[in-house]
Amino acid sequence: MPDYNTKAAVFWWVAFAVGCAVGAHSLATVWAMTASAKFGVTVGVALAMAAAFVSISIPRAGLKFSAGDVFICLVLLQFGPEAGALAAGVEAFATSWRSSTRWTSRLGSAAMVTASMWLCGHGLHSLLGYLASHHMGSSLGTIVATAWFSLLNLGVSATLMGQPARLKRNQRFKLSDLAGVMGWVGGINAVEAVIAALFFLAQDMLGASVLLAIVPLVGLVLSTLYFFGRQQSAEEAKRTAETNALERETQLVAIQARQREADLAAQHMQDLAISERRFHSAFTHASIGMALVSYDARVRQANPALLTLLGRDEDEVLGRPFTDFVVGVHLKPLAAVLAEVARGDSRSSVVEVQCHRPDHADVWASVSCGYFSEPDSSEHSLILQVQDVSARRRAELELHHRAFHDKLTGLPNRERFFDRLAESIERDRVTGGRPFAVLFLDFDRFKLINDSKGHSVGDEFLLQASRRLASCLREDDLLARLGGDEFAILAQGLRADANAIDLAERLLEALRLPLQVGSMEITATASIGITFSSMGYTRPEDVLRDADTAMYRAKAEGKARYALFDVRLHTEVANRVRLEADLRSALAEDGLSVAYQPLYELSSGQLEGFEALARWVHPELGPISPATFIPIAEESGLITQLTRFVVKSACHQLKRWQLQDPAYEDLSVHVNIAARDVADDEFVARVRDALVQSDLTPRHLVIELTENILMAQLSAAMGRLTELRDLGVGLSVDDFGTGYSSLSHLAVLPIDSLKIDMSFVRHLREGSKEAAVIQAIVLLGKSLGKYVIAEGVETQEQLDQLREMGCHIGQGYFLSRPLPIEAVDALLRGTRPRPTQAPLQQRAARSLALVH
């Protein structure tokens, strides 16, 4: 059993053992029968085995059958399951002996068929006994039961005999595997079973002598079918012979075709020789350089185009190696190409090289090398085609320079800086002893220059500033413009960290001198962040990130200075990264909440509404200040998710409070949005969805955005505010008075209210500058028909002054701190706003009418 795996071998031996046991039991059972019964069984077994050696082919079906199953079924019906199993096993052994030479197939088939027949035969006899005991044992029932038994026995035996092959291929048994068996074979087995049942019933009614008349008749029919099959086989053999003759004729035609091809090939070789002679005549007139060279690269023949390309006479070129005219750095690639073609590894190959010229001009050439032979010469050569590609190379170098250099300053760009930084990291990791530092520089007031003087002045400033910076560098240092007003310096080969600090101080000192930009002198300071290779970096992006972090620390400490990245900053960055990940999870898992700070009408003290404020209680760190997680959300792009959460929560919660009492139906809720929300095309759609889902009236939602955001993105903000106004949502300018807005813009913006920045309210005193600013804002709001809201009210004095100035609405710790939902519920139970109060848009219109 060389091709049997373990599972197949175990199955075969188990099946063989079971079959042998069943066979032994069946033989003992038959041996105990009467002499006449044993004689009948012996005759049936003999007939079944004899029929197995005479198979009948089914024409054009590819199948064969024998009449052995008729006698097996007859023995089974007449003498019982053991006699049937014995007859089936002997017939199977005879059939497999004729069809297979493997002892595993001969013995295994006989054993498995014996076991299957014994099992199914007992089933058939049990069924027939059951039918007889219940008076249902008709002749038709016997015939049908025998036919179904034959199909069952076929399926069981086919499954058992096919299982070793499946186990060899590690395949499982599938019911679909029986589809091929239950076709012709199943039908033939059923017919044979029906014939056996008819014999059995005829014998039962007419006696055993009927078999003597029927058996010769069956033999005659089978003989007729056998000889008919032989005739069909003869006809198939005749057709096969005719097919073979046709194939031989086809082969003869193919031989003749090959002969014609050989004749054509000979003619082609002759034409090729003529073509090569013509080649030599056209060689000298080619527009590109051409040369015939020996295997050692010596020039045997060169055309005028090549001589012109090299700038040399024919005497200077012939007999010399072509490599004498190639720049040294390209000799090795050219030699490799020549050797490759000379060895026959390639029919042709191309390489680009730089050539020498007596006038020292740089000439780039594409050298194509191929194998060349002449029909009338036994000496083989290499043919070189040399084309001037200097113009293309120069264009490629220019494109490469543009791809890795800043267009404005000509400095390396971010991609080039990253490449050089990665090289420095790898060199420091492998060799050590060559530390480096990265300085990240950002100008402190560049946006003001751009906004006030224009982009052309800003570009000229960056150009001159980059030159000023470059003048402070050492020879090995690399200065790159990363984008905008951000520059980076890679300082290599430092003997100590102090060298990088000295460089930063030189840069700051150089920038203190004004730059002459056109007719203007401009002085702009810069903040510099520094990090060192001693931090153990492995990725350039990590180096630049830490230097950027240190730069922001320098800005936070007062600008126009440098800051060093250290472990403390590294911890801050790590904490920030952790908070960003936790904030992302909190937004995804509803880990945030919303607090609501009440807004009151200052003249009456009535509750007007609330400002919705995001709150985050970290599961490990406790409450996280909005001043900490809001900037993280803005920088990481999570601010849009945060705004969506606050808007949706505020709308649903306000609607719930409004439904508690009709007196609360005019309460409003204010929600702050960020610059990224203004730029988001989907923001208005999300606000609309929140209103629809909560069933909140749009005028009860007020969207607040800061004055700086409004002015910085005026064009985008104008369109977004118009969409919100069309939706019916209220609009307010937050932190008013801190930005650079103009009255012309304020007059046309579709806003309802101005919220005075708390920095003015915090320092509000009688006769102070802050009081004058607030009074001006209140008058401005009234003149434009806008409601004025003061935030940050912390004392009774501030409240009284704001009320006297005519400020409409106030909020702050003196009035109420931000409250959780439960506290607001308690507040509403003790506060009943006037049912006639109007929303902000209506009050603004009323105020405007009073002014006019």
Image (cartoon, grey):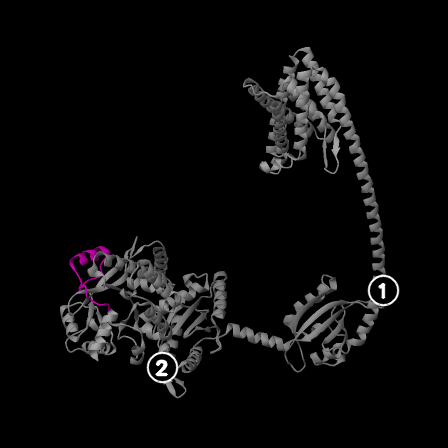
The answer to whether 26 is drawn above or below residue 680 in the figure is above
Residue type, mark 1 in image: Gln
Is 345 contained in the magenta span? no
For mark 1, give the secondary structure: helix
Q: Is residue 660 above or below residue 110?
A: below
Q: Which residues are magenta?
A: 814-839
Left or right of 104: which side holds 588? left
Q: Quadrant of residue 114?
A: top right
Question: Which of 803/342 is in front?
Answer: 803
Instruction: Please say if the residues under marks 1 and 2 sit with CB atoms less than 8 Å apart.
Output: no
Q: Which residue is mark 1?
A: 267
The residue at 42%/66% (across/down) is 544
Q: The C terminus appears in which quarter of the rendering?
A: bottom left
In this view, 560 is above or below 642: below
Residue pointed to by mark 2: 452
For residue 140, which quarter of the picture? top right
Q: Is residue 823 magenta?
A: yes
Instruction: Kindly give the residue lying farthest to the bottom in the view shown.
Output: 519
The residue positioned 71% from the left and 23% from the top of the image is 48
* Residue 572 visible here: no
Q: Quick one: label 1, few (<14), some, or many (20+) residues within 10 Å?
A: few
- State left or right for residue 192 relative to residue 232: left
How many circles with numbers are drawn on the protein?
Answer: 2
Tell me residue 745's x, y (percent): 32, 78
* Dominant secondary structure (helix, strand or loop) of the stretch shown in magenta: loop
In the depicted structure, whether residue 276 falls above or below residue 124: below
